[in-house]
Image (cartoon, helix red, strand yellow):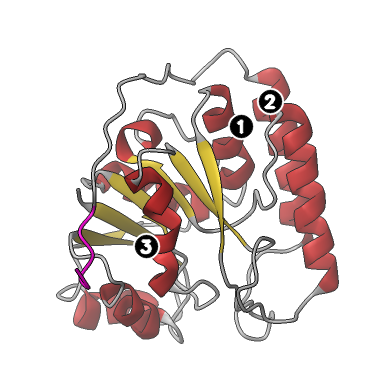
Amino acid sequence: MKLSIVIPCYNEIDTIDSIVKAVKNCPVQSKEIILVDDYSTDGTREKLQSEIENLVDKVLYHERNQGKGAALRTAIMAATGDIVIIQDADLEYDPSEIPKVIQPILDGKADVVYGSRFLGSSAHRVIYYWHMVGNKFLTTLSNMFTNINLTDMETCYKAFKREIIQSIELEENRFGFEPEITAKVARMKCRIYEVGISYYGRTYTEGKKIGWKDGFSAIRCILKYNLFRRSSQVPVLQKDRKTETLQDESS
């Protein structure tokens, strides 16, 4: 099996080199790396063109800034792997943990896996209290409508069987992707697992972009995709399961 690692990026000049190196060193042998630049203006775009295009499998460029969800939509449709995982272009999530996140899919137990920042004993940087409260509130609100018991709906690390994620029509252009995709995979009756991960959060001075307005947008999306769009744009999940293994570099 092949893993597609999709990386949306926007103005990540300080971290793009490090994240590409870390993803390339991720201990999964068969993988492709796809970056989508969402019209960066800080030099990220030029660095991708001059230094990074030859280091990864695909770099795609938006001609105007559209948002993380739009960048993910572009990257996901370009993926060719059996499994697709989302990796942010900052350094908040550790690519060495990708094998742990995708393992339930490889074991034939899961169709979708979320990497939870609120499970387990992995290292976590101590940072904004109200962000944590907001994340837990949004997760709880989402769970009330989807009737699944996630601990971290807003996490970056989400892994999918490719046929599942590519069969879903994704609509949100910004951070509304998280509640949208959660509502849609829950409605498909996917087997969803969570795995505890570490988290190295950034401050706003270090480049963090999500803000309180995105929290209100997430609430809108939770209501929109759970109450008002229940009968549309969600495919039927095929029940044909195959248990396959992805060979680790260490084996």
Q: Is residue 178 left or right of residue 44?
A: right
Q: Is residue 59 visible?
A: no
Residue visible at 47% across and 58% down?
Answer: 65
Of the numbered discs 1 and 2, the one sitting upstream in the chain is: 1
Mark 2 Cα-neighbour bin, 10 Å: few <14, some 14–19, many ≥20: many
Residue 212 is a magenta residue: no
Residue extending furthest toward the left: 54
Q: Position of residue 72 (x, y in %)?
A: 42, 50
Q: Could you tell me the amino acid type at mark 1? A: Ala
Please give the count of numbered marks on the rendered protein.
3
Identify residue for label 3. Answer: 99
Instruction: Please tell me whether mark 3 or mark 1 is closer to you in this view.
Output: 3
Q: Is residue 139 left or right of residue 168?
A: right
Identify residue for label 1. Answer: 183
Q: Position of residue 38 (x, y in %)?
A: 42, 61
Q: Is residue 145 visible?
A: yes
Of the numbered discs 3 and 1, the one sitting upstream in the chain is: 3
Q: Could you tell me the amino acid type at mark 2? A: Asn
Identify residue for label 2. Answer: 226
Q: Position of residue 57 (x, y in %)?
A: 18, 63
Residue visible at 38% across and 32% down?
Answer: 164
